[in-house]
Amino acid sequence: MSKIAFIGLGNMGGPMAVNLAKAGFETVGFDLAAASLEQARAEGVKTAASALEAVAGADVVVTMLPMGKHVLGVWGEIADKAKKGALLIDSSTIDVDSARAAHAIAQKAGLASLDAPVSGGTGGAKGATLTFMCGGTEAAFAAARPVLEKMGKKIVHCGGAGAGQAAKICNNMILGATMIATAEAFVLGEKLGLTHQALFDVASTSSGQSWSLTTYCPVPGPVPTSPANNGYRPGFAAALMLKDLKLAQEAAASAGATIPMGGAAAQLYALFSAAGHAGDDFSGIVNFLRGAKA
């Protein structure tokens, strides 16, 4: 596979496309935002005037778009025009039903397809250390792996169509809930006279340990690389966490699952975002829990 079309060159898609170009693939990108096109072009990605132009002759098409309706719109536009035998990969985070509908569009056009959302944030996108959670056939997964390995560090086949999105939604529900619990622990620790470092030293080496604590600690100090030490600039914005938690709620309603902690986390992030912090890193919810004013 030599030519890759990349549709969606935003904060995540842009760096991912750049890494493909650096890896030696002929990478042609498209985005509706002129600034995103310009940035990608400056870093070695060829650009096209439309999605159809980008897709022409491509062996692989990767999409990284905001919502399911955007993915379905683009896949519906390009599927019949794509190269025979092309592989379509969607790395957006969207609802499971839309992911399965996208697979159906590809199948109808005789194309292989994979839903492959990512975890790792903008840092992972730039550093090519993303985790890809993949749904689709074994053959599609095998064909996609050489491409995904140039953008990520961990590539997991989760099952059939939509399984990648299911894994992503479940993972981020865990993340959202554990970040709130971690932030609450620090707020309580402050009230009880504990220093941040003391609580971190205990919890990070005992049963309270989690990624939210050891990698993304929500208070300044213990983890120098966490957003808490950079004014809570994302990272992973609260608005994106809220989006994923809402997707989990929708999936739970559709599947008949009971997820009270996920529901509580969604409500808290909705309040945090509505208070003017949608653009803050999601770990900044610690300040909201302290009762800080918007």
Image (cartoon, rainbow, N blue to C red):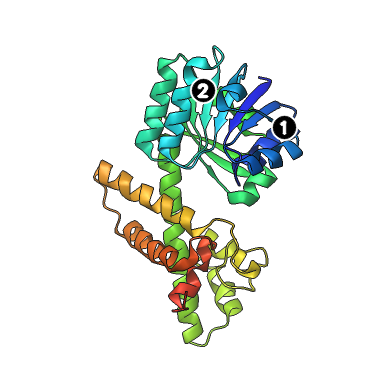
The answer to whether residue 92 is above or below residue 49 is below
Closer to us: 89 or 158: 89
Q: Which mark is residue 21?
A: 1
Say left or right for 232 vs 207: right
Which x, y percent locates residue 141? 53, 26
- CA gap, disc 1 and disc 2: 21 Å
Let me know if residue 210 appears in the view: no
Q: Secondary structure at mark 2?
A: helix
Residue plotted at (75% across, 35% down): 44
Q: Residue furthest top?
A: 84
Residue 76: horizontal and vertical position, in percent?
Answer: 44, 24
User: Which residue type carries mark 1?
Assistant: Ala
**Picture residue at 43% right of the left edge, 42% below the top:** 167
Q: Quadrant of residue 8?
A: top right
Up/down of 175 relative to 70, above or below = below
| Placement of the N terminus among the 4 image quadrants | top right
Q: Residue 291 is drawn in which quadrant?
A: bottom left
Tally of numbered tags: 2
In the image, 1 versus 191, the foreground residue is 1
Residue bearing mark 2: 140
- Residue visible at 38% across and 34% down? 98
Q: Residue furthest left?
A: 256
Q: Check disc 1 and report its element: helix, strand or loop.
A: helix
Amino acid type at image mark 2? Ala
Neighbor class of circle 2 (other Cα within 10 Å; few <14, some 14-19, many 20+) is some
Residue 177 in picture, x, y percent from top left? 41, 61
Q: Counting other residues with Cα less than 10 Å from the Cα at mark 1, is it few (<14), some (14-19), or many (20 or more)?
A: many
Instruction: Say whether residue 114 is visible.
Output: yes
